[in-house]
Image: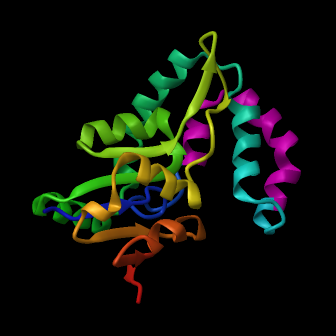
Amino acid sequence: MPDLALFDFDGTLTTHETFPDFMRYAVPRWRLLVGGALLAPVVFGYRRGWVAGNPTRASIVQVGLRGVQATRLRAQGDAFAREVLPGLLRPEAMEKLAWHRERGDRIVVVSGGLDVYLAPWCAAQGLELACSVLAERGGRITGYAGAQCVGEEKVRRIRALCDPQAYVAIHAYGDTHEDMAMLAMAQYRTYRGRAMA
């Protein structure tokens, strides 16, 4: 029976968070400048620990992506996955992912990142994915579809995909407090590259 391997993406499989990189890649410069001015108090509050990650990301998505043509954004996500993400991958984490693949383990990437770039990357890697999803109406992006895939939501998404009890062991890899609920599910936990007790 294979084990279950759960990987956070940003900062775990990659060297840093990719959400800001994607926003700079996909959002027109004029909109970045206007959005930067509008969101400066929110971003400042986030960096000082006064504003949580979820409302910060929701505000950035609203200002940066709301009303954008969905087909165009998905094409940009495909390009970002092909052109940018390979240069951001952490070699030692990808080696661990390859180790799980060789063992025949079931591997799921569980991320608060956006589906528009994570879905094509995971599809190219042959990996399952649970992540934050963008909603659209009338062909235009409207914001997040449901809850962002962080914290306890990671656990809910994992349980929706599979029965954790069906596996002999669970391995989980993360790098922030938003991964702790997922790490708590596992017998083998790795935080920022180090095994946890």
Which residue is at a point 41% across and 85% down the rendered structure image?
A: 196
Which residue is at a point 48% across and 32% down the rendered structure image?
A: 116
Q: Is residue 44 magenta?
A: yes
Q: Is residue 4 magenta?
A: no
In the rendered image, residue 29, in percent from the top left (x then y), is placed at: 69, 30
Is 197 on the left-hand or right-hand side of 58?
Answer: left
In the rendered image, residue 191, in percent from the top left (x then y), is placed at: 44, 76
* Above or below, 109 relative to 180: above
| Pick the front one: 45 or 136 | 136
What number of labels is visible? Answer: 0
Residue lying at the far top of the rendered structure: 138
Image color mode? rainbow
Could you tell me what secondary structure mostly forms the magenta stretch? Answer: helix
| Pick the front one: 151 or 29 | 151
In the rendered image, residue 67, in percent from the top left (x then y), is placed at: 70, 19
Which residue is at a point 39% across and 82% down the rendered structure image?
A: 194
Which residue is at a point 42% across and 41% down the rendered structure image?
A: 118
Position of the N terminus by quadrant: bottom left
Please indicate, yes or no, whether residue 82 appears anywhere in the rendered image.
Answer: no
- The quadrant in which residue 52 appears is bottom right
Is 197 on the left-hand or right-hand side of 146?
Answer: left
In the rendered image, residue 171, in percent from the top left (x then y), is placed at: 31, 70
Please indicate, yes or no, whether residue 36 appears anywhere in the rendered image.
Answer: yes
Is 79 on the left-hand or right-hand side of 37?
Answer: left
Position of the C terminus by quadrant: bottom left
* Above or below, 63 relative to 71: below
**Residue span colored magenta:** 19-45
- The quadrant in which residue 128 appears is top left
Residue lying at the far bottom of the rendered structure: 197
